[in-house]
Image (cartoon, rainbow, N blue to C red):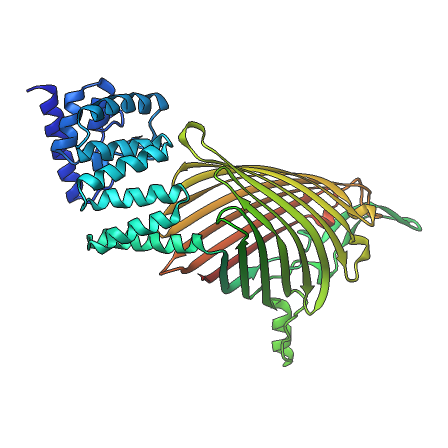
Amino acid sequence: MTMRRWLVLASTILLIVGTLARAEEPFRNAEGETALQVALRAGKRAEVMSLLTETQAAYFETFTRGPHEPTHPLPQESLDRAWHLLAGLMREHPRVPELNFIIGVLSVKRNDLARAELAFERVIQISPDNHRAGVELARVCTLSGRHDVARRTYEHVLAQDPPENVARKIKRQLAEIDRQGKRFHVSVRLDAGAIHDDNVNVGPSSDTVAVSPISMGPYVFTELSVDRESQPVDTSGAYAAATVETLYDFGQSGGWGAAADLNYYENWLDEQDSDKRLLCAVLGYPFESKEGYETRLVRVALGVKHASKKGIFKGVVRAARIWDGSDPLVDTVGIMPAYLRIFKPGGHRLYWISALLAEHREYDTRNTYDGLYLGLEQTARLMLTDNTSVFAGLRVADNNADAAIFSYTGLSGVAGATVIWGRLNLSASARYTRNEHDAREVLAPRDRVDERLQLNAKATLRLFGKTGLELKHQYTDNASTFELYDYDRNVTMLGYWGRF
């Protein structure tokens, strides 16, 4: 049997099995190549035409290599080789719809959208009821920013009564075009749930701390006891949060726009002091919860945003107030410009994110904390697949407080990963921070340096529509040269969220 017949037979069998299994990816050999890719690499023109005309290979081919990384594209030289062979066949067989279709798919991979559009249009001219070509043509028009043409093409395919799964995809794409075509965009997210914090007051780990020697007559003290009220407080309660994001495009969608964001967070906590609760029960007194650890945050941001094919810039002026219980704690006002740049090294998407925060902080009663905070952070996120990413970042900071003992310079590094598995989104990260303070506190035995390790884990489960459950846990271990600031803390939140 000739090589051509082997390729046609093998591809036909695999495509039938794949269709029965409802697979969207073509079957591949041990090197991750499809039958069509093998024929294109070998330069077998007759075998390529047979695969295209006698099987459905054209409609399964994605010009990616697997099997373990099916979203990894073929090298550029392989795409160019395939292009030259298919272009030659096109001159000989201009009226073959499958050949035109695969040229359109390859043109998208080579970022030649104009040629892709012409190829899919030729398929529709030859085969007007080719729903797949109509959908691909509309998708190319969307990528080109020609949303009106894309809409007309989608509506034309929808009017031909395509299969139900095709109709559902088209309706989703039309809804996305409607969203992108609007000048005013608004997004709202609401959260509510339960929270547990085993050290809500950030109390020291030990009930005694080492201090600089204190002489009182014949006695010298090198450590002091921590007041009972300052030791860690375990508490539980409820929380609620809301985020409103708005964007108004000045002109064409995706260009310059004005952005306005509003953030709100509040919790309601009960002090879980078992000794005090037991004593009240024995004496017959009612137990009174302490509300001083409850917090509230309201933040408003106004700014501009610019989106292009290679990146997104957003610059905002933001102001916030944080309450400690029912009393104001701190007011902040600052600027935060950020820029996200997209690269594609080795076929993977890489997001390079640069952000600056300059913020003045004004405390209500703790005036020694007042001052200017500056932070510069650089983060890189690499998409290993469409559903898996890893990221790492570095941040430098300077806090210039009115009191030198609360002024510091710091360096922070973070690394983590995210995985999407169906409706489940998992993420985890670890951040290490080192802050060196400008001056020593009176009781501190030596210059203060804080080293903090913070571990974060989050699981988000989408239930139906744009709602779901979210579980978050944060562990903090802070080690300081002044033991008063040695502490560890666990915060767990379980809530329900909805996006509108």
Looking at the picture, does residue 182 appear above or below residue 27?
A: below
Left or right of 219? Residue 86 is left
Residue 462 is situated, as x and y percent measured from the top left of the image, at: 38, 56
324 or 252: which is nearer to us?
A: 252
The residue located at (59%, 62%) in the rendering is: 264
Residue furthest bottom as drawn: 284
The residue located at (8%, 19%) in the rendering is: 2
Residue 257 is situated, as x and y percent measured from the top left of the image, at: 56, 51
Task: Tell me the quarter of the image containing the C terminus.
Answer: bottom left
The reply to whether residue 69 is visible in this rendering is: no
The residue located at (92%, 49%) in the rendering is: 218
Left or right of 405? Residue 57 is left
- Write down the quadrant of residue 385 in the picture: top left
Residue 333 is situated, as x and y percent measured from the top left of the image, at: 71, 54
Looking at the picture, does residue 36 appear above or below residue 246?
A: above
204 or 98: which is nearer to us?
A: 98
382 or 281: which is nearer to us?
A: 382
The reply to whether residue 431 is visible in this rendering is: yes
Count of numbered badges drawn on the protein? 0
26 or 261: which is nearer to us?
A: 261
Residue 132 is situated, as x and y percent measured from the top left of the image, at: 23, 44
Residue furthest front as drawn: 125
Residue furthest left as drawn: 1
- Write down the quadrant of residue 62 in the picture: top left
Left or right of 422? Residue 16 is left
- Write down the quadrant of residue 198 in the picture: bottom right
Left or right of 275? Residue 26 is left
Task: Tell me the quarter of the image containing the N terminus.
Answer: top left
